[in-house]
Every structure is written in structure tokens, then in C-alpha cells.
Image (cartoon, grey):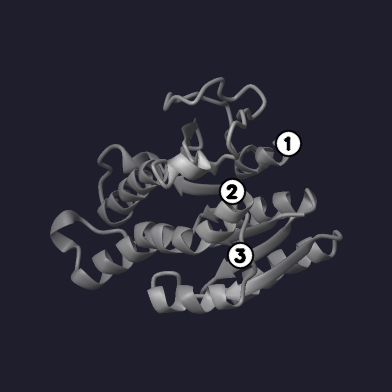
Amino acid sequence: MRTVLITGGGKGLGRTIAQTYAANGDIVYINYLQDKSSALETLNSILSNGGKAKLIQTDIGNRDSIKNMFDQLPGIDIFIHNAVYPVSARVEEMNEKDWERAFAVNASALLYISQYCFPHMKANGNGRIFGISSSGGKRGIPNYLGVGVGKAAMEAIIRYLRTHNTRSNNCNLFNIFHFSFPLVIIFYRCLKEGERFSINAWTPSFTSSVPKTSAKSPDSISIAVSKDVSIP
């Protein structure tokens, strides 16, 4: 039984991912900030189906709050960064408060939370970190500056996670899965030494190639993310 932390897990795609992991027998920690009603709906849907989950209200855009969150958590085996600060503004209209908040939530939180996850993952020789991105992380979209730049930074952070302590832990796998939703799921996995990787037929190698799937809905994306349950 693994521990799973999902930021922005109280509704939407985060809810579906939480439900999928719980259905596979994992203990899911559902992070949310403001929408407690939706988070409770997610929690109750999992508990009523025999799953295990807990809510954890935290502002992941604040580093001190992240520290306080991990004071309440066990070691995390799987971390999915799904939360987003969805600011919409033209370039000339972007204000300092929204810009800094968007970057803190959309990008910096991935780094800071990963730093707290690493000790447990390294001790076990195994761990997984996912980031939910979008096409705006790779190309300019009108009024999407606040989100798109953060997503691009998030993708870069995942690439650098690939280099983390590789000599002792073989944390050296990086793949990007593109979906027509359109979303991008960035995947990082800390491997045991000598272990080979596979997610069914998704990716046959350790390259940074871009395999494509036909996933078109939150359900299919959540199943895709949780397919790592089949990895020993």
C-alpha cells in the first residue's frame, strides 16, 4: 500500500486521479486550499467505496505552509502536482501579485514539495513524481502568460529532477506523455539500481521521446497516470 499526495486533488482531474489511486488500494492525501465542499465530496466518494484517503488543506504557494503540510504527512511514495493558479491576463495587464502567485503555485510548489518527498523515495529506492502541464507550456496562447510560463518552468523542473542524485539512486528516467485533452503529463521516477522500466506499451526506452496516446478525458488521463500501479 503506497502513499499518494495530489495537489489540487479536491475536484476536476485531481478528483479523478485521487479516486483512481484509491481504487487501486493506495492511501491518498488530497490537498486543497479553498473549496472544502468539493474536497469533502471527493473524500466521501473514496471512503464510500472502501478506499483510504485524507484531506489536507494547504496553500502550496507558500513555502512555510508546505513545510507544515509535511509535518502532518507520512513519507510520500507518489506525488502528483495537479494544482494550478489559473490567472488570465494579457501581457501588458499582468500584475505583480498574480504573476508571483501563479509562478509559486504552478512551478515553485513542484520543486519544494519534491524536496520533501525525496528522503522517503531515496530510502525506498523508488518514487514517482508527476506534473500536470498543458500545451501552453510549449507555445504561446493569448491571455495564458501566467499559467503557461509556470507550466514551462514546471516541465524544466521535472527535467532537472532527472539528474537528482543519479549515481546512488538511478533516478534517471524522464518521459513526457502528450494527450489530446490537451494536457501534458510529465513523469519522473526514482528507480532501484538495476531495475528496468515499463508502463505497458507506453515507452520502450529511457529516452526523452514523446509517445502519444489517444486519451481524451480526465478518466483516461487518471488511469494513465495511475498505470504505475502495475510496476513492481
Which is nearer the N-term, disc 2 or disc 1?
Answer: 2
The answer to which of 186 and 87 lies nearer the viewer is 186
Q: Say what amino acid the circle numbered 2 marks.
A: Gly
Q: Is there any visible trace of residue 128 in the rendered image?
A: yes
Whole-angstrom CA distance, mark 2 to mark 3, is: 23 Å
Residue 24, horizontal then vertical, whole percent: 78, 48
Circle 1: residue type = Ser
Q: Earlier in the sequence, mark 3 or mark 1?
A: 3
Label 2 to label 1, Cα distance in Å? 14 Å
Q: Would residue 85 be visible to someone looking at this image?
A: no
Question: Viewer-nearest of labels 3 and 1?
Answer: 1
Q: Amino acid at mark 3?
A: Gly
Q: Which residue is mark 2?
A: 127
Seen in the picture, residue 196 relative to 112 is either above or below; the reply is: above
Q: Residues within 10 Å of mark 3 (few under 14, many from 20)?
A: many
* Residue 230 numbered mark, or none: 1
Q: Is residue 166 left or right of residue 18?
A: left
> Do the residues bearing badges 2 and 1 touch, measured as CB atoms within 8 Å?
no
Q: Label 2's element?
A: strand
Residue at position x 61%, y 64% from top?
10
User: Viewer-proximal residue, 11 or 23?
Assistant: 23
Q: Mark 2 or mark 3: which comes first in sequence?
A: 3
Quarter occupied by the C terminus = top right
Q: Dot 3: what SS? A: loop
What residue is rendered at 47% in x and 36% in y?
172
Q: Residues within 10 Å of mark 2 (few under 14, many from 20)?
A: many
Q: Nearer the viewer, mark 2 or mark 1?
A: 2
Which label is found at residue 10? 3
